[in-house]
Image: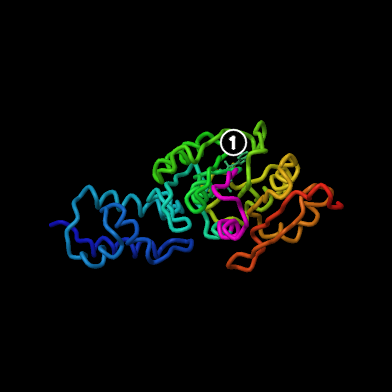
C-alpha cells in the first residue's frame, strides 16, 4: 500500500528533529510540497492521499541532504526575496531578508523616473531584477562569476524583465562607463577569512566562497567600491550592504575618499546594515 502524505511528513519531521543544527519545523512539509508539486497547506488538507514510490524516494533523498546541512533554498531551487521567488542553486548566494532593507532604502530615494541602475555583485540578480520591477528601472547586473550570471539570466527569464536587465561579466566596475547610471547598488562579499569559523556549516560548506568572503580582509570589497567608483557623478547614490562591524568603520573607510555618508539603516537585529553614500559635489569642501 502506498505511503500517505501524512506518514511521509511525520517521517520527515522525526528525521529533521535529529539535526545538529537549527531546522524549522516547517521544512518537512516544504520539501514534501516541493516534491509533490503542492502548496504547504495542501500537505495538511490532503494528508491522507497516497504518494507514489518515486516521489517518496525523492523526498527521502531531500531529507538526507538536508541533514547534511544543505540549505532548503538549494534543495527546492528557490528563495523568496521582496515578495518574488528567485531561482537559486549552489552557484549563488541565497538572498537574505536583511538585503530587502537595501531595496527599501533605494525606494525611499529621490530618483529620476525609469532610473538606470548598476548592481555590482549581482549573484542571483535579486537586486537588479527587483529594482527593475519596483522602479520600472533599467539595470545592469555585474558579477565576476559566470556561473552566478547563468542563474541571474534564468531569473531574468523567470521575471520577464527582458533587456531591461542586462548582465556583464566583470571585476566590479572595471571597464564600465559609469556616466549613464542614476544609482549603484552592491551587496559585496564582506566576510573576512578570519570570520569563517563563526559561520554556520550551512553557509560555509554550501554557499559560494566568492559570494561570502572578501579577499584579504572583510573591508576589501567595500574599500574597493569607495575607491573605484570615483567617476560616479556627484549626487548619484551608492547603496551598499555591509557586515556587522562595518557601520563602526564607515568613517575610516570613507576617510580621504570622494564619497560622503548620507544615511545608514539598521537590520531587524539592530545592526547597521545598509549605507547610502554619494560623491561630494564639486563646490563642497572635503
Ligand atoms: C554577497 S553576494 C550578493 C549576491 C546578490 N546581489 C544578493 O544580494 O543576494 C556577492 C556577489 O558578488 C560577486 N563578486 C565577488 N567578487 C566580485 C568581483 N570582484 N566583481 C564582481 N562581482 C564579484 C559574487 O560572485 C557574488 O555573486
Kindly identify which residue carries mark 1.
Answer: 144
Q: Residue at x 50, y 36 (%)?
A: 147
Q: Is mark 1 within 8 Å of ligand 1?
A: yes
Q: Residue at x 44, y 46 (%)?
A: 88
Q: Residue at x 42, y 40 (%)?
A: 154
Most foreground residue, 277 or 235: 235
- Ligand 1 is found in the corner quadrant, namely top right
Most foreground residue, 65 or 39: 39
Residue 212 percent across, percent down from the top left? 60, 47
Residue 77 percent across, percent down from the top left? 39, 48
Q: Seen in the image, is 116 located left or right of residue 63?
A: right
Q: Seen in the image, is 51 located left or right of residue 26?
A: left
Q: Residue furthest left?
A: 1
Q: Is residue 99 magenta?
A: no
Q: In the image, which residues are magenta?
A: 102-119
Q: Secondary structure at mark 1?
A: loop
Amino acid at each position: 500500500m502506498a505511503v500517505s502524505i501524512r506518514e511521509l511528513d511525520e517521517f520527515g519531521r522525526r528525521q529533521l528533529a535529529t539535526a545538529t543544527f537549527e531546522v524549522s519545523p516547517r521544512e518537512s512539509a516544504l520539501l514534501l510540497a516541493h516534491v509533490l508539486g503542492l502548496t504547504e497547506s495542501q500537505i495538511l488538507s490532503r494528508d491522507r492521499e497516497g504518494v507514489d514510490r518515486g516521489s517518496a524516494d525523492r523526498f527521502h533523498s531531500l531529507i538526507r541532504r538536508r541533514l547534511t546541512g544543505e540549505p532548503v533554498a538549494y534543495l527546492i531551487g528557490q528563495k523568496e526575496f521582496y515578495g518574488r521567488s528567485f531561482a537559486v542553486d549552489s552557484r549563488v548566494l541565497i538572498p537574505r531578508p536583511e538585503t530587502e532593507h537595501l531595496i527599501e532604502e533605494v525606494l525611499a530615494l529621490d530618483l529620476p523616473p525609469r532610473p538606470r541602475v548598476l548592481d555590482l555583485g549581482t549573484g542571483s540578480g535579486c537586486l537588479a531584477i527587483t529594482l527593475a520591477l519596483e522602479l520600472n528601472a533599467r539595470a545592469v547586473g555585474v558579477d565576476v562569476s559566470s556561473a552566478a550570471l547563468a542563474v541571474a539570466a534564468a531569473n531574468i527569464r523567470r521575471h520577464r524583465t527582458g533587456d531591461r536587465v542586462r548582465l556583464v561579466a566583470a571585476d566590479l566596475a572595471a571597464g564600465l562607463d559609469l556616466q549613464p547610471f542614476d544609482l549603484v547598488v552592491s551587496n559585496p562579499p564582506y566576510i573576512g577569512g578570519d570570520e569563517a569559523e563563526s559561520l554556520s556549516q550551512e553557509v560555509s560548506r554550501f554557499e559560494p566562497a566568492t559570494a561570502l568572503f572578501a579577499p584579504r580582509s572583510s573591508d576589501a570589497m567595500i574599500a574597493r567600491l569607495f575607491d573605484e567608483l570615483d567617476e560616479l557623478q556627484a549626487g548619484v547614490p551608492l547603496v551598499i550592504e555591509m557586515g556587522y562591524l562595518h557601520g563602526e568603520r564607515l568613517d575610516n573607510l570613507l576617510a580621504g575618499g570622494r564619497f560622503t555618508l548620507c544615511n545608514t539603516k539598521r537590520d531587524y537585529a539592530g545592526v547597521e546594515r545598509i549605507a547610502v553614500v554619494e560623491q561630494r559635489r564639486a563646490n563642497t569642501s572635503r
